[in-house]
Amino acid sequence: MPRLPVALTATLIVACGLGVRALWDGPFSKYAGDALYTALIYALIVLVLPRARPWTVAAGSAGLSWAIEFAQLGEIPSVLRPLLGSTFNPPDLLWYAVGAATMQAAHTLWLRRRPGS
């Protein structure tokens, strides 16, 4: 997977996340942010491991998001709370899966359209 499109995708995901938070409030922005958080993790994994298979990256990005969510059942250091959150919320687990599945679908489609991938 070429790194430039992946880096541009990661940048677009961050812009979408900031846009969602700026334009909307409440559950929509929260859960969209959850899905985008996992989508960004997905893109960063592909940036580091460009030959990784989509299902592997999806499992890794969802798994990392879930691990962070479950860590919130304990005490997150205050310096990390803006990045990792502080309150466990079970519906977040679903939205992390949505973000990973969406990225997996897009990644798979990209690879299918590219000869030799």
Image: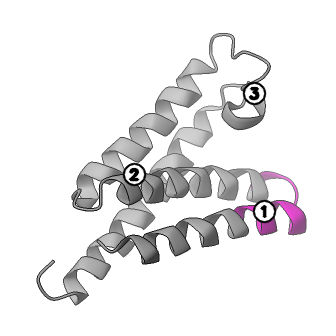
Residue placed furthest toward the left: 116
Q: Position of residue 46 (x, y in %)?
A: 36, 58
Q: Residues within 10 Å of mark 3 (few under 14, many from 20)?
A: few
Specify the amino acid type for callout 2: Ile
Specify the quadrant of the image occupied by residue 50: bottom left
Q: Position of residue 58 (x, y in %)?
A: 35, 52
Q: Which mark is residue 45?
A: 2
Q: Position of residue 77 (x, y in %)?
A: 72, 15
Q: Quadrant of the C terminus?
A: bottom left
Q: Quadrant of the N terminus?
A: bottom left
- Verify whether residue 20 appears in magenta: yes
Residue at position x 52%, y 50% in the image: 38
Give the residue number, with chain letter if any, for mark 1.
18
Residue range in magenta is 17-27
Specify the amino acid type for callout 1: Leu
Residue at position x 55%, y 65% in the image: 10
Total marks placed: 3
Give the residue number, with chain letter if any, for mark 3.
81
User: Marks 2 and 1, how far apart in space?
Assistant: 21 Å
Specify the quadrant of the image occupied by residue 82: top right
- Compared to residue 30, the image places residue 84 above or below, namely above
Residue at position x 42%, y 65% in the image: 103
Q: Is residue 15 left or right of residue 63?
A: right
